[in-house]
Amino acid sequence: MTNDKILFSKNDHLFVLLNISEPGEENGIPSNQYLVVNNGKGILIDPGGFGVMPQVLHHLMKYIGPEDIVGIVLSHQDPDIVGGLSSWMEITQAKIYVSKIWLRFLPHYGITDMHRFEGIEDDGDDLALNDVVLKLLPAHFLHSPGQLNIYDPLSKILFTSDIGAAEYQDGDLSEIFVNDFPQHQRRIEYFHRRYMSSNRALRYWLKTIKPYDIDIIAPQHGYLYRDEAKTGLLNWLETLECGADLLEID
Ligand code: FE
């Protein structure tokens, strides 16, 4: 699936979904890349693996040139997020934002220009983009020990990375939103039980995001959530046992 959809557009502010599959991976995990544009400058969120980079660039250039990408946020350290980063660093002057705990691991992706990185503290940070201040919110241990969410107060979209991520998209591929959360659970249940670290981490994250007025939850894989599906996801996560909760000792 290759697609791009404008999720929010008002005045000079855009929040765009770029949904791209790895080439040749018919059953592989499609990944969502997101672009926030404000007054002609952009932040690229989780640019994706090496294989998707040309397509992401192609779709992104409908909205903005690479020279106007001023920041790239990496929600965590995984290859489907960071794999294409050295190419992005060549064609942009963007600063790169990632949890401080991953800084010393990223050179293993062949990245040498570490002075362009800013390590984000464990309690998150603000990220200004012209007229808007994006919130980098911690979502640690979901699944990565250093995981960042991004909240955009203008669009009221919360990018959640792997939280809410579906391992596969089926049904109507032109649809980008979950329309029936109970049906959708089969796409996310194994992933969340196996990859998310614990219910305690989930409840801590729910407390972190509670102050924010959220219209759309936008994960790094699969369908997005709004309305009842958004509430359904948050309620489901509140009581989900996962990760270390499921280890039996005896
Ligand atoms: Fe991940």
Image (spheres, grey):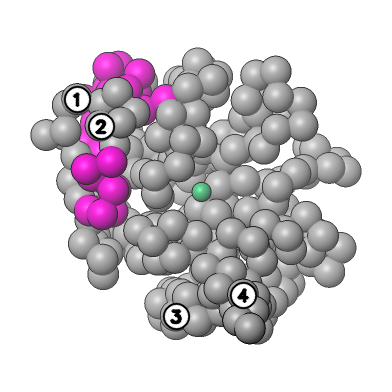
- Placement of the N terminus among the 4 image quadrants: top right
Q: Position of residue 189 (x, y in %)?
A: 74, 63
Give the label, 4 or 2, closer to the camera. 4
Q: Which residues are magenta?
A: 84-105
Label 2 close to label 3 by CB (< 8 Å)? no
How many neighbours does mark 1 have within 10 angstroms: few (below 14), some (14-19), or many (20 or more)? few
Lower sequence index among marks 2 and 3: 2
Lower sequence index among marks 2 and 1: 2
Of the numbered discs in the image, which one, if any, rests on residue 247?
A: 4
Q: CA distance from mark 2 to mark 3?
A: 31 Å
Q: Position of residue 101 (x, y in %)?
A: 26, 54
Give the label, 2 or 3, closer to the camera. 2
Q: Position of residue 36 (x, y in %)?
A: 41, 42
Seen from the viewer's position, the closer of residues 145 and 51 is 145
Q: Secondary structure at mark 4?
A: loop
Q: Residue at x 67, y 57 (%)?
A: 191
At label 1, which amino acid type do we have? Thr
How many neighbours does mark 4 have within 10 angstroms: few (below 14), some (14-19), or many (20 or more)? few
Q: CA distance from mark 4 to mark 2?
A: 33 Å
Q: Secondary structure at mark 2?
A: helix
Q: Secondary structure at mark 1?
A: loop
Q: CA distance from mark 1 to mark 4?
A: 39 Å
Lower sequence index among marks 4 and 3: 3
Q: Residue at x 54, y 23 (%)?
A: 52
From the viewer's perspective, tell me whether residue 219 is left or right of residue 173: left
Residue 206 in sight here:
no
Give the label, 1 or 3, closer to the camera. 1
Of the numbered discs in the image, which one, if any, rests on residue 112?
A: 1
Q: CA distance from mark 2 to mark 1?
A: 6 Å
Which residue is label 2 attached to? 107
Mark 2 residue's CB less than 8 Å from ligand 1: no
From the viewer's perspective, tell me whether residue 171 is left or right of residue 201: right
